[in-house]
Amino acid sequence: MIEIKNISKTFEGQKLYEDFSLQIEDGEFVIITGMSGCGKSTLLNMIGAIESVDSGKILIDGKNVMERKNRLEYFRRGVGFLFQNYALVDNKTVKENLKIVKGKSKNNVSIEEALKRVGLEEKENTKVYKLSGGEQQRVAIARLIIKECSVILADEPTGSLDWKNGEIVIGLLKQLQAEGKTIIMVTHDLRLTQHGSRVVELDA
């Protein structure tokens, strides 16, 4: 369970959150929407412990991830990120990109199995820069399948994709949710809200 308790956050002189609380149950697919500049990505980054809070707590299974000792374990085995820009090494092959994660993970899922699940088993030795945007995002999802994580934070994961590829990515995220993972996704595309188990709309 994720508990956001009475957090406040000011960013570049703008107060984004004041005494804000939210509870997310295990296995939910929560979609966060709102106007540009309302703090959607900042909230996601705070839940991911890569952005600090000014006050308040963010608890993951009862542990405050703002504390260093809990944050390191959370990064290793608790949380995975899916970004709009894919965050892959362009001049390395798909397999080389996934090896970086596999070497740190105790998960039993192989690189081959992860690629098969995202429909890219024949792209294993292809350089990332030769892939389409949709294929690159599926490699990023394969990386999450290999990594040990119970929470997936997705920041506009379909923002650079056409509608068809966006639907494929959402379908893969829903499969991960069906396996028990908690998905929190930020999007400005209101068409995608139908896929969530809950929508949280932030005020500007």
Image (cartoon, helix red, strand yellow):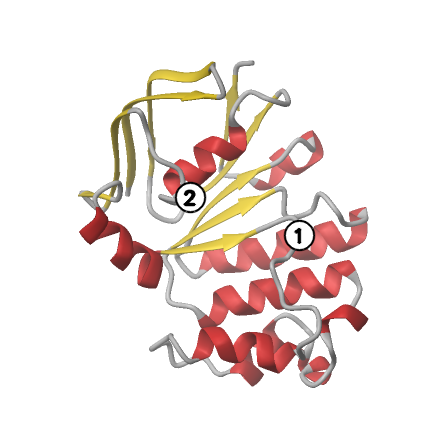
Using the rendered view, name the quadrant where residue 119 is placed. bottom right
Q: Quadrant of the C terminus?
A: top right
> Residue 181 at what x, y percent from top left?
41, 55
Question: Which residue is nearer to you in this view: 124 or 176?
Answer: 124
Left or right, 152 with reference to 25: right
User: Outermost residue, front direction?
Assistant: 12
Element assignment for label 2 = loop
Between marks 1 and 2, how big is the CA–CA gap?
Answer: 24 Å
The residue wearing badge 2 is: 28
Q: Quadrant of the N terminus?
A: top left
Q: Amino acid at mark 1?
A: Asn
The residue wearing badge 1 is: 85
> Residue 164 at what x, y percent from top left?
80, 52
Element assignment for label 1 = loop
Question: Which residue is nearer to you in this view: 31 or 123?
Answer: 123
Q: Across the whole image, how many numbered discs are drawn on residues?
A: 2
